[in-house]
Image (spheres, rainbow, N blue to C red):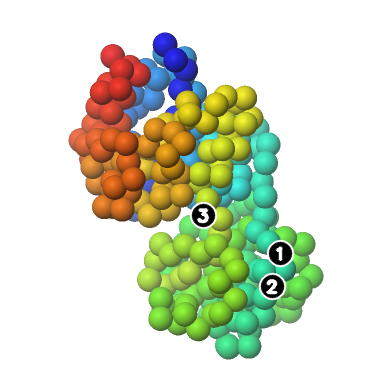
Amino acid sequence: MRKRYFFFDIDGTLAAGPVDGRYVPESTKLALAELQRAGHEIAICTGRAHAMARPYMEQLGLSNMVCDGGNGIVINNKLVELEPLDRDACIRVLEECDRKGMLWGVSITDTQHRLTRDARFVEAVHDTYMHTTVDPSLDFHELPRFYKLFIPCTPEEEGRIESLASVPTARFSPYVLFVEPVDKGRGVRRMMEHYGAPVGDAVAFGDGENDLSMFLPDWTCIAMGNAIPELKERADYVTADVDKDGILLACQHFGWIE
């Protein structure tokens, strides 16, 4: 059988349920095991930072991953690439936030830790998944790199920040804008280069807006039944919902597993 290289988004694709109760369906676990048994390669493809995504990868018994929205690559459990954001562009965003009196936080290490200068930031972001250090003397001009920026603001306030035009952004919350890599397709290409395999042998599974970047005509794209309409329009095949055996059924449909 022709060897394939599978790339799975996490939330809404591999994992079902609400944010505070995510779980991987048993049929999905079965499909992943059968794909590996058949000799295929499996990788997570996520916008999550490497430090946050690695426990999930290990929980599933996987060793390959595209993380950080395409800027990070893990092969055989080894982080082989982790590219930061454009530093100068990030500084311009932070300078503009300062001029306009807007709060911000930054992630500069491969950890679940971020820095901010204003204690009000902690409450404004409405999350608890990262540890935040408040340092009133923090000077972002002295920081060596940026992996993510966090800007607490509404979608309307976001439009006030002109410098955002030069950085990639994503919004997963009404409370905060993320400046982070959003090109999963680039990550898939880089991973295929590491594998030394033709991109046409890649298979991408996804459901959300941040998966649009990896739903390209260069490889096979499969949208979950619960995917957004725009993703389904780009897909080569639309399977069932994540909690209705979607991954298993798609793999059986294409004959990748029995």
Give percent across and percent down for residue 209. 38, 55
Q: Are marks 2 and 1 in contact (CB under 8 Å)?
A: yes
Distance of mark 1 from mark 3, alpha carbons? Answer: 16 Å
**Which residue is pictured at 56% across the width and 44% down the height?**
186
Q: Earlier along the polypeptide chain: callout 2 or callout 3?
A: 2
Q: Which residue is mark 1?
A: 87
Is the N terminus in the top left, top right, bottom left or bottom right quadrant? top left
Q: Position of residue 120 (x, y in %)?
A: 53, 80
The residue that mark 3 highlights is 182
Residue holding disc 2: 91
Mark 2–mark 3 CB contact (< 8 Å):
no
Residue 12 vs residue 153: left or right?
left
Location of residue 174 in the rendering, given as x and y in whole percent from the top left corner: 38, 71
Q: Closest to the observer: 56 or 238?
A: 238
- SS state under label 1: helix
Number of numbered discs present? Answer: 3
